[in-house]
Image (cartoon, helix red, strand yellow):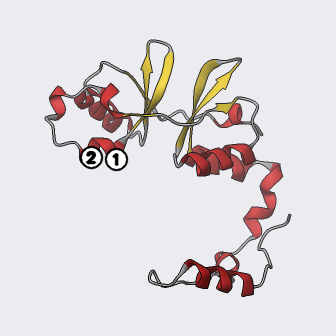
Amino acid sequence: MRAKDILSKNVVEVQKNEQVSKLAGRMEKLSARSAYIMDQKEFLGIFSLTNFLKSRSDISQLKADLFVKKVAHLDAEDSLMKVAKQMLNSDSFLLPVYENKEFFGVIEIFDFFEGILESKEFTWLKDIKATELRKDKMFVHEKEKISAALTKMAGKSSKAAYPN
């Protein structure tokens, strides 16, 4: 399964000069969790909910381009593992997908998880119990030094709940 196979369908596209109030209305109407911002056919970035929530301006006066968050992009042929790595590294739950240098669509984290569950490559995930994932967790107090955390980590078993 590739990135192009799990494109999101429930994401709102908005042009950079649209009012945020209209965007919010469209997101509510479609029960969408995410939005991305375009300049005609050019992908600018994702709608930054964090920046929007920090804003104290009148929502009816704000344009979408004030809340553009630049994120890494994926290629349509990227594997699900690459999708996961990009989402983790970019600290974003919505990433654009390009095919032949053209904007192709977006992948939202929820669609990524659905893709994993449907993929034959990750069937082993279905057999892991939640208790197995937390077996080797360690806890560090916020006032502990990093060296103490590293020492604790080095002393933990390296058994993994998943295959290599």
Above or below residue 24? Residue 17 is above
Indicate the amino acid at tag 1: Thr
Q: Quadrant of residue 51?
A: top left
10 Å neighbourhood of mark 2: few (<14), some, or many (≥20)?
Answer: few
Above or below residue 155? Residue 61 is above
Residue sitting at x 31%, y 27% = 64
Q: What residue is pinned by disc 1? A: 50
- Image quadrant in which the C terminus is located: bottom right
Q: What residue is pinned by disc 2? A: 53
Indicate the amino acid at tag 2: Leu
Task: Give the mark count.
Answer: 2
Instruction: List x then y, in percent, for residue 149.
Output: 60, 81
Q: CA distance from mark 2 to mark 1?
A: 5 Å
Instruction: List x then y, in percent, for residue 84.
Output: 66, 49
Instruction: List x then y, in percent, for residue 115.
Output: 68, 46
Residue sitting at x 73%, y 82% = 154
Q: Are marks 2 and 1 in contact (CB under 8 Å)?
A: yes
Q: Secondary structure at mark 1?
A: helix
Q: Left or right of 18: which side holds 88? A: right
Q: Left or right of 138: which side holds 53? A: left
10 Å neighbourhood of mark 1: few (<14), some, or many (≥20)?
Answer: few
Between 14 and 127, which is closer to the camera in this rendering? 14
Residue sitting at x 79%, y 68% = 162
